[in-house]
Image (spheres, helix red, strand yellow):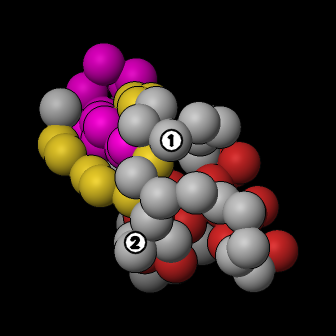
């Protein structure tokens, strides 16, 4: 295990959070985009959820950026 760095884990309280709000309807969109919206936990227009700022969540947000707004919490 030479050359590998020990990965640092942050506790849930230390991680950044993002407030994601669905602004446009998910109907009539690509299936993968609807799946990203569902993966973020959004169901209704103008519904907001708070998610952790992880690469996985950032990727979903980038994919549907035309449908959502994002704020740091």
- Give the residues drawn in magenta, as a range: 11-21
- Give percent across and percent down for residue 49: 44, 30
- Residue with the mark numbered 1: 45
- Give percent across and percent down for residue 43: 65, 37
Outermost residue, left side:
72
Q: Nearer the viewer, residue 50 or 44?
A: 44
Tell me if residue 61 comes above or below residue 21 in the rendering.
below
Marks 1, 2: nearer the viewer: 1
Secondary structure state at the residue bearing disc 1? loop
Q: Verify whether residue 13 appears in magenta.
A: yes
Residue, x 45% and y 65% (percent of image)? 67
Residue, x 29% and y 55% (percent of image)? 69
Question: Which mark is first along the chain, 2 or 1?
Answer: 1
Q: Verify whether residue 73 appears in magenta.
A: no
Crowding at mark 2 (Cα within 10 Å: few <14, some 14-19, many 20+): some
Q: Residue 65 carries which label?
A: 2
Location of the N terminus (image quadrant): bottom right
Q: Distance between the residues labelled 1 and 2?
A: 14 Å
- Displayed quadrant of residue 51: top left
């Amino acid at each position: 295990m030479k050359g590998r760095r020990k990965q640092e884990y942050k506790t849930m309280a230390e991680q950044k959070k993002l407030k994601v709000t669905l602004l446009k309807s998910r109907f009539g969109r690509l299936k993968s985009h609807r799946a990203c919206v569902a993966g973020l936990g959004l169901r209704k227009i103008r519904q907001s959820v708070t998610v952790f700022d992880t690469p996985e969540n950032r990727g979903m947000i980038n994919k549907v950026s035309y449908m959502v707004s994002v704020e740091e919490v």
